[in-house]
Amino acid sequence: MAEELPQHPDFLWDNPDPKKTYDAIVVGGGGHGLATAYYLAKNHGMTNIALLEKGWLAGGNMARNTTIIRSNYLWNESAAIYEHAMKLWEGLTEELEYEMFFSQRGVLNLAHTLGDVRESVRRVEANKLNGVDAEWLTPEQVKEVCPILNISDNVRYPVMGATYQPRAGIAKHDWVAWGYARKCNELGVDIIQNCEVTKVLSDGGRAIGVETTRGKILAPKIALAAAGHTTTLTDQLGVRVPTQSHPLQALVSELFEPVHPTVVMSNHVHMYVSQAHKGELVMGAGIDQYNGYAQRGSFHVVSEQIAASIELFPVFSRAHLLRTWGGIVDVTLDASPIMSLCDVEGVYINCGWGTGGFKATPACGWTFAYTVANDRPHELNEPFSLERFTTGHLIDEHGAAAVAH
């Protein structure tokens, strides 16, 4: 049977009115903002913090992702921060004292061409050097891990093998947000919803606070965790942040008994699928190519991803689509995030995670909180500074794979 979800209290955090001043303000009440506020309080003793969310808590990309968690990235810098996240995920339920259904069911990244195979084997060996669990599987071994997958040669995209990370998996995104919010509240963080930041205030090159729809709030440290909307604030400061926002679509089917034991991703055809705890099939694809803040996308993207899914999983051909949705992802030129100080003292930028933000949530919060508290980067996020776009020290995950989910 599909997994039964436990009951939780009606209210997990308070809804205070904003104070006039704080020691720090975190802009954005999604996973990254929540994790940053939590680790600022827990690791650095900063409890006079306001977490400002323009809508409802975790109502942006945190509520619009497909919950995949993995750390099998190619480049050393990416593998390091995502593996740190994986280790934090493995103890997060106990740390937050809140169930978040972290299911380490493994992730398969399929290879369909000789180029895919070469890149995949290279990534497996790079992962091993970085201490990340990774294996290369033959088509027959892939079938053992996921019996419903079609490995026939008589298809457009034959499965020529796959990388496999056994420790990877999924978690329930909303429960992750609630767990962090509950602990933030316990530690004294003010979680303020329906409070949109319209401007970051500065004086003499230093941050002094923010202007919001609920009035002016002062603080010497402003941590931006607003994803695709970051540039609407940084542009006003004269800080250029090289990201572009795109819609990213996903969909779920009706509920089924457990049939899909793992997570399967196909970079070549831009398709990935898992089965959620309640039983629905969760599917996604690549980003829509146009820029914008619309939380919906193009029909042809959904159509092509469903066609690819049915080819790889014939058993899905009679599944009924339940709903689709879109998120707004902010993508950098090298498909790697930005976690950085900037030219305005006291302003810290966390954005550009593209399609990989959810899986990084604990490590992002851990390292970004360190950066805000100490006014210098943590060793894990130091490579992801704004300066790399000037120096040319890019972390080109775009060049390493066709998709960065």
Image (spheres, rainbow, N blue to C red):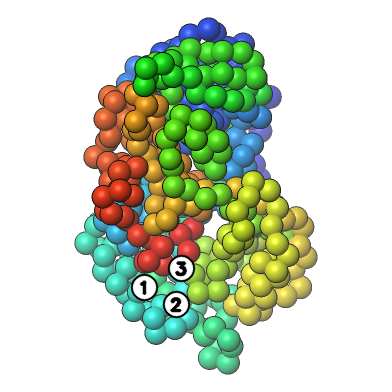
Q: Quadrant of residue 361?
A: top left
Residue drawn at 77 percent across, 65 percent down: 320
Residue drawn at 70 percent across, 69 percent down: 300
Label 3 neighbour load within 10 Å: few <14, some 14-19, many 20+: some
As drawn, is 298 to the left or to the right of 84?
right
How far separated are the C-alphas under marks 2 and 1? 7 Å
Q: Which residue is mark 2?
A: 111
Circles 2 and 1, Cβ within 8 Å, touching? The answer is: yes
Confirm whether residue 212 shows in the render. yes
- The amino acid pointed to by label 2 is Ala
Placement of 356 over or under 28, stated as above or below: below
Q: Earlier in the sequence, mark 3 or mark 1?
A: 1
The percent coordinates of residue 257 (x first, y second) are: 68, 61
Residue drawn at 29 percent across, 26 percent down: 375
Residue drawn at 55 percent across, 88 percent down: 152
Residue situated in front as seen by the camera: 151 or 157: 157
Confirm whether residue 92 shows in the render. no
Placement of 45 over or under 265, stated as above or below: above
Label 2 neighbour load within 10 Å: few <14, some 14-19, many 20+: many
How far separated are the C-alphas under marks 3 and 2? 12 Å
The percent coordinates of residue 121 (x first, y second) are: 32, 74
Q: Earlier in the sequence, mark 3 or mark 2?
A: 2
Q: Residue furthest top?
A: 20
Q: Which residue is mark 3?
A: 402
Q: Which residue is mark 1?
A: 120
